[in-house]
Image (spheres, rainbow, N blue to C red):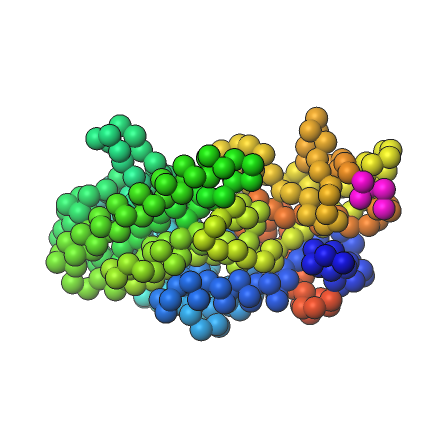
Amino acid sequence: MTARAADRARYDRATAHLDAPLAIVDLDSFDANADDLVRRAGGKPIRVASKSVRCRALLERVLARDGFAGIMSFTLAESIWLARSGFDDILLAYPSADRAGFAELTGDPKLASAITVMVDDPAQLRLIDEAREGGRETVRVCLELDTSLKLLGGRVRIGARRSPLHSPDQVADLARIVARRDGFEVVGLMAYEGHIAGVGDSIAGRPLRSRAVRLMQATARRELAGRRAEVVAGLRAVAPGLRFVNGGGTGSVQFTAAEDCVTEIGAGSGLYVPRLFDNYTSFSGRPAALFAQPVVRRPGVGVVTVLGGGYPASGAAGPDRLPVPYLPEGLRYDPQEGPGEVQTPLLGSPADDLLIGDKVWFRHAKAGELCERFEQVHLIEGDRVTATVPTYRGEGHTFL
């Protein structure tokens, strides 16, 4: 029996009393992935990206482990909810235009001390001030550095379009604007290198493209390490109260951690290890989050149909954004239908061994987005469900 076949047997035994569709997290794999992230971080704390988890119980579990400290959230409403739930070190990783949220934040000392907000434009400061409604709490601010690699005098750009702050001078200038404005304090810098951390460099069947990605990433790492050090040095001169410099992502943990100026690493997807993280040479993880769909039809030889399953991930549309049939091994989509909203035909010889009501296990393309499809996840240890916990959606929250 292969390791994957053994996992299928465990998951089927653990959930035999449960009807699909359902979602699970294998805690043995989750914990092993957490240990691997800590090892790669080399002693620097990991701030957990909540968008890649979206389950309070699992956030609590990982933050109870040595090597993890703080949350990187994705909306202000989520940040406030988490702070009111007892989490006390929350970095909002994206700028917000949530005026009601800022009114609440600036009027509550507990929230203001727990949450740091992201800023990369003076207009965002004005929006916060206009939303205060009398709230006088100092807002903790993190500036975001654009990490993109610019070549040929800027005519070629590689990396996500995020912050407009690219140079040391641009970051320092905004820090000065914040310092001159009452009610704000710069406490951090974030620089997420998505083109390094979030792009696989070992693409099956595409050796030339894989080599090109590795070359690009090596070039980008060198350029960013030098520029980030300059930015941090300049920023500390303007904002002596700087408390953290956040960088990295699941795919670049060890490289970013090696930079002296970086004080903490941001990561989250590496806990679940979705399918987009199969194509890396720098690390390997254990798939921890899966979902099961029930077989409801047998249209013919070598074909079964499962209920639902059309859960595409965000990003540029393409086959790599689709869930992948994982267990039993050897199933594939019908290219004329793909994964459907209410039914998904699956082809392959394993289909002939599946009966009506059997489970087919899938892996989502991305991490936390799976939790937007399910109200709860069943936590598996060995071949038993040891707990069932709500996702954000199960607690009544769909923040995005």
In the picture, residue 331 is in which quadrant?
top right
Measured from the top left, where is residue 123 in percent x and y?
24, 41
Residue 350 within the magenta-colored segment of the rendering? yes
Q: State whether residue 296 is above or below residue 191.
A: above
Name the quarter where the N terminus is drawn. bottom right
Left or right position of 211 against 135: right
**Could one spot residue 353 in this view of the protein?**
yes
Closer to the camera in the image, 312 or 152: 152
Left or right position of 150 against 311: left
Q: State whether residue 179 is above or below residue 389.
A: above
Measured from the top left, where is residue 31 in percent x and y?
55, 67
Closer to the camera in the image, 235 or 154: 154
**Could one spot residue 127 in this view of the protein?**
no
Left or right position of 146 against 54: left
Closer to the camera in the image, 232 or 277: 277
Q: State whether residue 306 is above or below residue 113.
A: above
In the picture, residue 47 is in which quadrant?
bottom left
Residue 32 within the magenta-colored segment of the rendering? no
In the rendered structure, which segment of residues is drawn in magenta? 349-353
Measured from the top left, where is residue 136 in percent x and y?
25, 59
Measured from the top left, where is residue 98 in percent x and y?
38, 46
